[in-house]
Amino acid sequence: MPNPFSYGGIVRGGDFCNRRKEIEDLVRAGLNGEKLFIHGERRIGKTSLLRRAADELRSAGALTLMINVWKCVDASDLVDLCASEFAGAEGSRGLLKRVKSIFEGLSPAVAVGDDGRPSLTLARSSRGFSPEQLESVLRASWKIADSNSDRRLVVIFDEFQQIRKLGDDSIERVLRSVVQERDDIAWFFCGSRTHLIREMFLDSSSPLYRSAGHYPLESIDYENWFPFIEDKFSSTDRNVPGSVVELLLRITSGHPFYTQMLCSALWDMSESGRAVTEEMTEQALDVLLEREHSTYLILWDSLPEMSRRMLRAVAMDDPLRSPYSGEVLSRYGFKSPSSAGRAIEYLVAHDIIVRTAEGGYAVTDRFLGLWCRRNLLTVP
Ligand SMILES: Nc1ncnc2c1ncn2[C@@H]1O[C@H](COP(=O)(O)OP(=O)(O)OP(=O)(O)O)[C@@H](O)[C@H]1O
Ligand SMILES: [Mg+2]
C-alpha cells in the first residue's frame, strides 16, 4: 500500500489540506483586481496554494498566468519568461497571429515546447537586458486584458524574492510603473524569505514600496490537520489516536511540509491493522533528524562564531523573545548588543532565523531547531 503522505512537491486534490479561507481570500482579491504581496516561510505551502487559487479563479472565469522567477538566471530571462507566459495566457489558439500584435516591435521568436506550451525569445541587442523591453512585455498584460474585457486577468509571480538576484535594480521600478497604471488587473507577488519581501514593500526606499497589500501565509491550523491526518491513516488501515496527532503537531507546529514529512515517516513505521503510538512518533522524528544530520552539520560549520552562538540561543528558547536582554547576552557570550545584532542580521539574511510577529526570533527550519536542541550543549 503506498504511503498516503506527500512532501517535497506541489500538493493537489486529496493531498491538499484545507486552506479554505486563504483560497477564498485570494480568489476574492484576484477577482477584485487587487495587488498583493503573499509571503511565508520556506515550504509553508505557497506554490500549492497559488495553484489551487489559480484553478478556482479560472473556474470563476478569470484568466490567470503564473511566472516562476526561480527559472530566471538574469533579467533577460525574466523578460523572455514573462513574454512566454503572457503569450500563453489566452491558450494557443490563434497565438502566432496574436503574438505579433501583443508584442509589437519586439520581434518575438516562438517555439513550442514538448508540453505544447509556447516559449518566446525576444531579439535583443548585445547589451542584453533593457528596462524598456521589460516594460513593453509587461504592458502586453494591458492588451490581453483589453481583448478579454469580460474576464479578469490575474498575473502571479512565484519566488518573487529572486527578483533581487537578477542583477538589475530597474526591474522593480518597471514593475511598479506597469502594475500601478491600471486597476483592472490583479498582480500577486509571492515569495519566501519574508524579510526580503517585507523590505520590498515596507522599505520606503524600495521601488515597490506600498505598491500592494500584504498577505502573510501561516501554518495550517490544528483543527484542519486533525481530520486530514486521521483520514489518511484510517483509509490505509491504520489507527491514529488523537494524542498521537497532537504530539505530532506540537513537534511541527502545523507547518505543512514538516507535518507531511513526519506523518510519512510515522506511516512507514506503522503496520496494517495496528495503532500508531506516541513512542513511534518520537522514533520517526529520530529517523528524520538522523537523515538531516550531515546537512545541518555542514550548515553549522559554515556559520561565523557569533552567528553560531545566536543560533544556539534562538534554538534553545525557540522563539527567543528578548535577544538583547542582559541575561541572554551574558549567557550566550556576546560582548555587546551590537555583536548580537550583527549575528542576528547574518542569520536573518541567510534565512536561518526569522523575526516573529511578537518581535522575537525563531529558527526557520523547525527540524534544524530540534536538531540544535538535541545536539548542542545547553548553556547553564
Ligand atoms: N495545503 C496543504 N496541505 C497539505 N500539505 C501541504 C499543503 N501545502 C503544502 N503542503 C506540504 O508542504 C510541501 C511544500 O509545499 P509547497 O511547495 O507548496 O510550498 P512552498 O511554500 O511553495 O515551498 P518553497 O518555499 O520551497 O517554494 C508540500 O510538498 C506538502 O508536503
Ligand atoms: Mg514554492
Image (cartoon, helix red, strand yellow):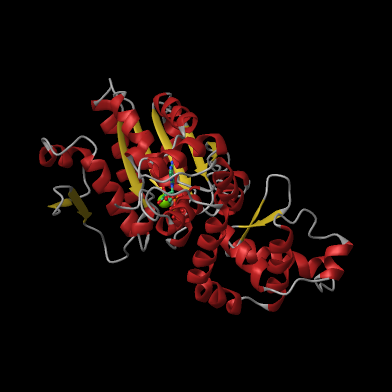
Q: Residue 135 at what x, y percent from top left? A: 36, 45
Rendered residue at 24%/48% (across/down): 84
Which of the image's four quarters has the C terminus?
bottom right
* 121 in relation to 67, above or below: below
Q: Residue 76 at what x, y percent from top left? A: 32, 59
Q: Residue 333 at what x, y percent from top left? A: 82, 74
Q: Residue 334 at what x, y percent from top left? A: 81, 72
Q: Which residue lies furthest to the top in this view?
A: 150
Closest to the observer, 78 or 63: 63
Residue 305: quadrant of the picture: bottom right
Q: Is residue 71 left or right of residue 223?
A: left
Q: Is residue 81 left or right of residue 111?
A: right
Q: Can residue 113 be seen in this view?
A: yes
Closest to the observer, 63 or 309: 309
Q: Residue furthest right?
A: 326
Q: Is residue 103 visible?
A: no
* 167 in relation to 22, above or below: below
Q: In this view, does 191 lie to the left or right of 199?
A: left
Q: Which residue lies furthest to the front in this view?
A: 273
Closest to the observer, 320 or 121: 320
Rendered residue at 25%/59% (across/down): 124
* 141 in relation to 44, above or below: above
